């Protein structure tokens, strides 16, 4: 069962499903069936949903709370906000020689949902899907769920997942949610925000 109070938590395994918006309306299908089991982490932030969303829809901000495991960020376009914004970065996965990845925002639905898709691995053959879902909590708080899933292309890619890549991703993503909460609530623990000069 998912933790009900503040702090990062991990949800149980998700069955393939049609995504739903925070207001209960069906969203677009995420096609999880073709991907490996997702990793989902969450946190509760003491801030309005619109404020949290506005921070997350600027992909240049994402390096601030993920640079403990995603480094060497570069923007893929000048405008870092909204649909079409993207970035390229390197994941510090131990033993992974093909660690570069890129993601682009393909859905930005204020104030409740952001979907990013991209590729990583050798020859960019591994697909990535990441989803941020924001829902209102009690007393003006916001619950943020982040789900990330990959689609390995070869047996060796699948072995990498089985040998610890998923557990490594879960640990690092949980820490990222804690950092996100600290940045928004207290303006502390920021990493370096990626700038146009770096991309």
Image (tube, rainbow, N blue to C red):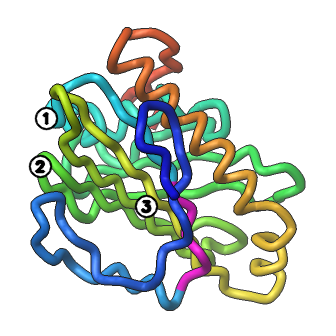
Disc 3 from disc 2: Cα separation: 16 Å
- Camera-nearest residue between 50 and 59: 50
Which mark sits nearer the N-terminus, 1 or 3? 1
Instruction: Find out whether residue 65 is within the magenta segment.
Output: no
Which mark sits nearer the N-terminus, 3 or 2? 2
Q: Residue at x 58, y 45 (%)?
A: 173
Could you say where residue 138 lies in the image, as x and y percent from the top left? 20, 33
Q: Secondary structure at mark 3?
A: strand
Task: Tell me: residue 126, above or below residue 59.
Answer: below
Q: Is residue 142 visible?
A: yes
Q: Give the left or right position of residue 90, taking residue 77 as reference.
A: right
Disc 1 from disc 3: Cα separation: 20 Å
Could you say where residue 28 lies in the image, as x and y percent from the top left? 22, 79
The magenta span reads 35-40
Q: Which residue is mark 3?
A: 130
- Camera-nearest residue between 154 and 112: 112
Q: Which residue is mark 2?
A: 110
Q: Secondary structure at mark 2?
A: loop
For the residue carrying disc 1, how many other residues have a C-alpha within 10 Å: few (<14), some (14-19), or many (20+)? Answer: some
Could you say where residue 149 lies in the image, as x and y percent from the top left? 53, 69
Task: Tell me: residue 156, above or below residue 185.
Answer: below
Q: Give the left or right position of residue 75, taking residue 81 as reference.
A: right
Q: Secondary structure at mark 1?
A: helix
Instruction: Find out whether residue 38 is within the magenta segment.
Output: yes
Marks 1 and 2 close (CB-CB < 8 Å):
yes
Which of the labelled discs sits on residue 50, or is there none?
1
């Amino acid at each position: 069962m998912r933790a009900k109070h503040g702090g990062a938590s991990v949800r149980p395994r998700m069955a393939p499903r049609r995504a739903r918006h925070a207001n209960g309306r069906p969203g677009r299908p995420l096609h999880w069936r073709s991907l490996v089991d997702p990793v989902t982490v969450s946190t509760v932030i003491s801030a309005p949903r619109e404020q949290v969303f506005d921070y997350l829809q600027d992909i240049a901000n994402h390096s601030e709370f993920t640079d403990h495991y995603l480094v060497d960020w570069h923007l893929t376009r000048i405008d870092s906000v909204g649909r079409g914004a993207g970035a390229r970065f390197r994941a510090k996965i131990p033993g992974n020689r093909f660690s570069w990845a890129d993601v682009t925002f393909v859905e930005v639905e204020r104030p409740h949902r952001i979907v990013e898709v991209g590729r990583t691995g050798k020859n960019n053959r591994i697909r990535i899907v990441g989803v941020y879902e924001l829902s209102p909590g009690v007393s003006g708080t916001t619950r943020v769920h982040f789900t990330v899933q990959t689609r390995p292309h070869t047996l060796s890619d699948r072995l990498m997942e089985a040998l610890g890549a998923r557990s490594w991703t879960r640990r690092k993503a949980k820490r990222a949610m804690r950092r996100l909460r600290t940045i928004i609530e207290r303006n502390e623990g920021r990493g370096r925000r990626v700038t146009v000069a770096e991309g």
